[in-house]
């Protein structure tokens, strides 16, 4: 949801049946709602929309498409006139002389509050073929930055395209201050990222930092603050990401802003058209925001205290003068409700719930727990019990997260809530290999060190039994993406522990994961993440189907460019070859997220029936 610069209108993207999303604009005075645009999800989906001005919206859409034998992502940034005029692409203008199509045309860097109706956009340029009978042709290549008028599409070059540039950071006031370059060798990414900066008023780029994706070492600039002439940089401190301010005056001076002894600092918080930085975030049990700005710190506490249940409050956007603020309040039992706060009147109006179908429904509380691992380490996790349940001797589901470079957090989780509503106890362990807890906890990652990750996942199942929460004969495991891999590999390693397995878009063969990346520029990074040697065979559940005793339900979209459906096909064939009980639910034209209301309804229905049959409810 976003608010216009004048504060008179809101926009939001609404899900409707099937995979369609609709962009709607609300007139705050009349409460009238107008549908402005939509995406049908075949294959494009609306990612986000924002007010470029009071009359022009800017949206980004994209999806997955087949390119030869591969599936590749694409995206486009467009201007959408509020009066229903023609949608206009904001990237490099397409023409007959471009030798190839673009996967990605660019992104918005800066909303230029001082120049209403214009944006600062980083654009991907592809050199044109020379036109017959002339020497003319646009030879620009790489990533550049242009100031674009949303109404006329007239543009002015701010940074000429550079082949080595991959991204830029501005100070929110239209000044480009940091450039990102991902190092390549023979056109393949090496994993080394270089960051350069420029001093105020200078055109020269100077070294700022570098980061190695393979070893997860180095520093990452994430934002620029005009007021202090500094970049905010994530840098390791005692094995965890801390937040520093690096001066951009050439002095090399840096100051520690924040660190946490338990978890990584992960981002900064912005507000308003100029994207003013007002705080930073991290997640211990739940997501925490620490505000630099005392006004927002006070306002956050006051709004949370005024709302029922004291939900977590975040600021999603503000009008041009900062007087009207869009607020999102959410908790474990509240999927989220949008409000509009007027600073001049101190009035808070409810706009809409994020998931209106759940209004008035009792949802399950989520409780942080500490799970003892087999080696004595305590694993952080979350326990969700069915509403009204005594929490004893229940059928249960272990729900490992995806990634593996990710973690679960306290809050609303639609999949865990669905399972709890069916009567299952649900546990979500942040096993070793999860991110957010520092480099030691992440270790080599959940593919290279899958044995430790699977042992931690198993420890969460034992925790449910030992606490009397779960009937040990009725424990299932369910996961998505890496979580699906964890579900299958856990069933291989601990075949008597789980009585049913659900794997959504799972990795099933580590060598296949590497093979599917071979035609992409990041294939070396994928290969490094997965590793080499005997682990490829030992860590691939599709090669050990004979060890699995529990029935298996696989779910996959056939347009999944993240984990190809060949993984589920291979797993199904291997299970059937060994005489195992297994089924595959396939969704045509859907990617890794399965973003389709009807498809998700069918998936959840099948999962519910499958679990009921295997472990009861």
Image (tube, rainbow, N blue to C red):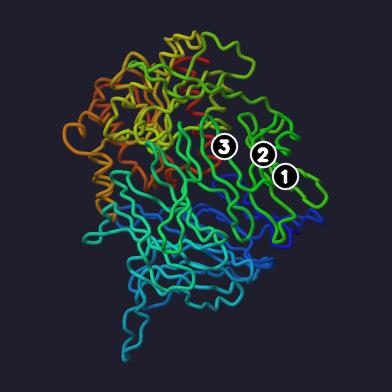
Quick check: marks 2 and 1 in contact, CB under 8 Å? Answer: yes
Measure the alpha-carbon separation of dots 2 and 1: 8 Å
**Residue at mark 3:** 288
Measure the alpha-carbon separation of dots 3 and 2: 13 Å
Q: Nearer the viewer, mark 3 or mark 1?
A: 3
* Residue 505 visible at all: no
Which residue is rendered at x = 63% and y = 66% of the image?
113
Viewer-nearest residue: 549 or 493: 493
**Residue at mark 2:** 329
Q: Give SS at disc 2.
A: strand
x and y percent of residue 500 in the render? Answer: 40, 20
* Residue 60 visible at all: yes
x and y percent of residue 261 in the render? Answer: 45, 32
**Residue at mark 1:** 339
Which residue is rendered at x = 46% and y = 66% of the image?
122
In the image, residue 387 sits, relative to residue 102, either above or below, namely above
Please state if 74 lies on the left or on the right of 9 as rendered: left
Which numbered disc flags the more N-terminal residue, 2 or 1? 2
């Amino acid at each position: 949801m976003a608010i216009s610069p004048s504060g008179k209108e809101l926009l939001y993207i609404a899900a409707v049946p099937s995979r369609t999303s609709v962009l709607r604009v609300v007139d705050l005075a009349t409460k009238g709602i107008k549908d402005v645009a939509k995406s049908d999800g075949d294959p494009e989906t609306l990612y986000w929309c924002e007010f470029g001005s009071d009359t022009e919206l800017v949206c980004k859409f994209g999806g997955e498409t087949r390119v030869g034998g591969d599936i590749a992502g694409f995206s486009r940034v467009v201007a959408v006139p509020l009066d229903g005029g023609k949608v206009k692409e904001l990237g490099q203008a397409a023409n007959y002389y471009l030798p190839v199509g673009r996967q990605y045309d660019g992104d918005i860097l800066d909303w230029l509050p001082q120049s209403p109706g214009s944006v600062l956009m980083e654009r991907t340029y592809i050199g044109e073929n020379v036109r017959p009978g002339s020497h003319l042709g646009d030879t620009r290549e790489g990533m550049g930055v242009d100031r674009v008028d949303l109404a006329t599409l007239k543009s002015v070059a701010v940074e000429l395209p550079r082949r080595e540039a991959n991204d830029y950071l501005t100070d929110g006031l239209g000044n480009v201050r940091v450039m990102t370059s991902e190092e390549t060798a023979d056109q393949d990414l090496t994993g080394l990222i270089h960051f350069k900066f420029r001093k105020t008023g200078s055109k020269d780029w100077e070294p700022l930092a570098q980061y190695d994706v393979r070893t997860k070492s180095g520093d990452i600039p994430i934002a620029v603050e005009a007021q202090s002439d500094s970049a905010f940089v994530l840098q390791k401190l005692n094995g965890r990401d801390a937040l520093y301010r690096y001066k951009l005056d050439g002095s090399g001076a840096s100051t520690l802003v924040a660190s946490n002894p338990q978890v990584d600092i992960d981002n900064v918080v912005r507000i308003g058209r100029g994207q003013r930085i007002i705080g930073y975030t991290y997640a211990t049990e739940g997501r925490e925001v620490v505000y630099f700005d005392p006004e927002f710190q006070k306002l956050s506490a006051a709004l949370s205290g005024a709302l029922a249940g004291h939900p977590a409050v975040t600021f999603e956007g503000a009008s041009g003068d900062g007087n009207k603020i869009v607020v999102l309040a959410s908790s474990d039992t509240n999927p989220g409700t949008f409000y509009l706060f007027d600073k001049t009147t101190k009035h808070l109006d409810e706009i809409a719930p994020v998931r209106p179908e759940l209004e008035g429904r009792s949802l399950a509380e989520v409780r942080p727990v500490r799970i003892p691992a087999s080696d004595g380490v305590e694993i952080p996790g979350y326990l969700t019990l069915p509403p009204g349940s005594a929490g004893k001797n229940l059928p249960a589901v272990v729900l490992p997260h995806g990634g593996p470079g990710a973690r679960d957090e306290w809050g609303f989780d639609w999949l865990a809530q669905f399972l709890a509503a069916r009567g299952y106890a649900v546990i979500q362990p942040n096993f070793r290999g999860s991110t957010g807890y520092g480099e030691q906890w992440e270790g080599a990652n959940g593919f290279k060190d899958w044995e430790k990750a699977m042992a931690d996942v198993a420890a969460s199942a034992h925790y449910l039994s030992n606490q009397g929460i779960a009937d040990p004969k009725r424990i299932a495991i369910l996961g998505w993406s890496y979580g699906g891999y964890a579900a299958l590999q856990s069933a291989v390693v601990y075949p008597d522990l789980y009585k049913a397995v659900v794997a959504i878009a799972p990795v099933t063969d580590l060598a296949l994961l590497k093979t599917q990346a071979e035609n992409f520029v990041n294939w070396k990074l994928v290969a490094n993440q997965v590793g080499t040697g005997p682990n490829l065979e030992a860590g691939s559940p599709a090669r050990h189907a004979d060890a699995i005793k529990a029935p298996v339900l696989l779910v996959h979209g056939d347009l999944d460019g993240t984990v190809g459906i060949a993984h589920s096909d291979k797993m199904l064939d291997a299970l059937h070859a060994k005489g195992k009980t297994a089924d595959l639910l396939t969704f045509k034209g859907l990617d890794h997220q399965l973003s389709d209301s009807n498809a998700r309804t069918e998936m959840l229905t099948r999962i519910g029936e499958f679990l009921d049959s295997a472990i009861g409810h």
